[in-house]
Structures are given as structure tokens and as C-alpha cells.
Image: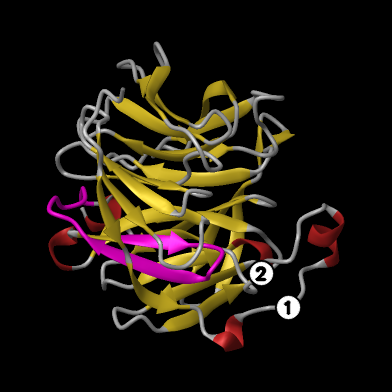
Amino acid sequence: MSLFAPPKLIEAEVFAELPRKFRKKEMSPERAVSGRSVPVHGCFLEGPSFDREGNLYVTDIPYGRIFRVSRKGEFELVAEYDGEPNGLKIHKDGRIFVADYKNGLMLLDAKRGKVEPLIARYNAERFKGLNDLFFASNGDLYFTDQGMTGLQDPTGRVYKLTAAGALVKLIDCVPSPNGLTLDGKETTLFLAVTRGNAIWRLPLLPDGAVSRTGIYIQMSGGRGPDGMALDENGGLAVAHPGMGAAWVFNHRGEPLYCIQSPKSDIVTNVAYGGAHRKTLYIVDSEAGCILTARLPTAGRIMYSHL
């Protein structure tokens, strides 16, 4: 018997689809040799993040592309380069940070359409493969180093790049660290652990170190949780690839909503935006589209808009 009431089911609406002219038929020889298949629909979108003008930036991992989606749902190619961009977040000074699986932490100059390296190594060791990132209100940047880690190799890492420029490793025992966000007080880091199919809770000590880490939400089915976003009441919106849905949990970790994609099962990331930040934008990566669902609680204001 479930401890929770069943979540309310919502079907998301299609806000924007990647145009046919941007859909690719082949991947680079390097990615093909690595055993990765050609995406069914010629793209694999990720990394949703809004700028101050209300444009939505998304990445296209296998083809090294970054797009800007207007408020009207129109896609514009901003940059294309030799990389595998995944997570993307915007600094309040306008700089655009990219977690690139192949190259490390990158900076996007949207005006020039250039992506340049920022940090590729920690203590002379290259990253395993960066996944996602999140800004604290003081400018500290948290990011995950996932690589090919999983239950067979629980050595995924979470780093913090302080606003002063110091790179700190917070934890190195995670079976596939993915999306992450801080709670409202910024004393706890929530971490999507994909291969463990769980959301971990990482309390932060006054000096910034991680304390007694534990499981906050244990999920089931699909591929495990991916990207996340926090609302103003402390609830978590969590993308769940393989389940074709994004879940919304309240501040106690109880499921409130299950937002289902009308397109594919591979829903990977979420971001709040729109009027009063009460629209959840959901990336259906496999279908190459952006979905939306109206919710009663606004998303937490992002660092880029402080």
C-alpha cells in the first residue's frame, strides 16, 4: 500500500519543436565508435535555461549545438562546435556556462557564437564527463561529473567552483550524478542519482563541505531521475527519462503531479518560466521538442535574474 495519495496526472502541451532543417542524420565518427546510436529524430536536446529576455537556451548533446528558443517557440542556432554540451546555466552578469561531457566546463559567447574552455581538469586530472550545473545566490557554481559511472562504478563526483575561483570536490562516491539544485535556504543540495534511481539529499556545513548524505526520494522505473528545478514552496520538479514524464514533489518529497509527454519517453530536464514563472518547460530530448505545463506554484527565481 502506498504511503502517498496518487499524483494528479497532467498531459503536457507542445510549445516548440526543433525544425526539420536542424535535424541531423549522422553523428561524428568519434561518437559512433564509442557505441552511441544515431538519435532517432536527429537531435538530443538538453540544458534548458532562460535569459533575462525570456528566451530559452537548450543544448543538443550529440551534435555540439546550442539553440535559443524565442517566446514564440522559434529556434535559432547560436553555436555549433566540437563538443557535447549538456547542462547550461546563465550567470547574472550574462555569461553562459556549459557543462560539456567531452571538454569540461565551458563558456558560451552568444553574440559571437563561440564556445571556449574554462576548466577541463581538477588537480591535473581530467573530468569523467560533466553533466549539469547550478548557481547558488552568492555566485558559487555546483556541477556534476557523471562520466560512465553507475552501480558498477560509484565514483561520480560533484564539484563547486566558488565565486572567488576555487574549485572544490564535494563528493566522489555517486553512481551517476546528474541534475542538481539547492533548497530555498541553500543549506542542502539535492542531487539526481540516475543509476540509483533516487534523489539524494546533501546537507552543507557552514564551511561548504558535505555532511550526512542520504536518500531523499527513492524512485522506480525508467532510467532514473535527470534534470531538476525547485519551486517557491520547496517542491522539486524532476524529469524522469524512460517514464516519459516529469514529476513534481512537495517539500516533504510527496508526489503531487505526474506531467506526461505526448511525444516520447525520454524526458530529461525542466525549467520554470513564463508569466510569474508558473509554467514548467520540459525537454523531450528524443522527440526534439519543448513541452509546457501550467502549475499553481511559481518556480524559484534563478540566479541569472537576481
The image shows residue 271 at horizontal and vertical percentages of: 33, 56
**Hey, which residue is sitting farthest bottom in the picture?**
21
**Chain part drawn in magenta:** 281-301
Judging by the rendered image, the residue that carries numbered circle 2 is: 40
For the N terminus, which image quadrant? top left
Secondary structure beneath label 2: loop
Is residue 287 a member of the stretch shown in magenta? yes
Q: Look at the numbered disc 1 and give the secondary structure of its residue.
A: loop
Count how many numbered circles sit on residues in the image: 2
Q: Which residue is mark 1?
A: 25
Mark closer to the chain start, 2 or 1: 1
Q: Position of residue 266 (x, y in %)?
A: 52, 56
Disc 2/disc 1 C-alpha distance (Å): 9 Å
Question: Which amino acid, by three-letter code, is at mark 1?
Answer: Lys
Q: Is residue 95 visible?
A: no
Q: Is residue 91 left or right of residue 254?
A: right
Residue at image location 85% in from the left, 65% down from the top: 29
Q: Tell which of 41 and 5 is nearer to you.
A: 5
What residue is drawn where x is 32% and y is 39%?
Answer: 136
Where's residue 298, x and y in %?
16, 52
Q: Residue at x 60, y 27 (%)?
A: 175
**Residue at x 38%, y 60% (from the top left corner):** 282
Q: Please, is residue 8 above or below residue 261 in the view?
A: above
Q: Is residue 197 visible?
A: yes
> As rendered, which of 6 and 137 lies closer to the eye?
6
User: In the figure, residue 52 lies in which quadrant?
Assistant: bottom left
Q: Do tag 2 and tag 1 residues touch (Cβ < 8 Å)?
A: no
Task: From this view, report whether residue 28 is shown above or below residue 117.
Answer: below
Q: Is residue 88 above or below residue 201?
A: below
Looking at numbered disc 2 in the image, what kind of residue is underneath it? Val
Whether residue 247 appears in magenta in the rendering, the answer is no
Expressed as whole percent of the image width and height from the top left, the position of residue 176 reads 59, 33
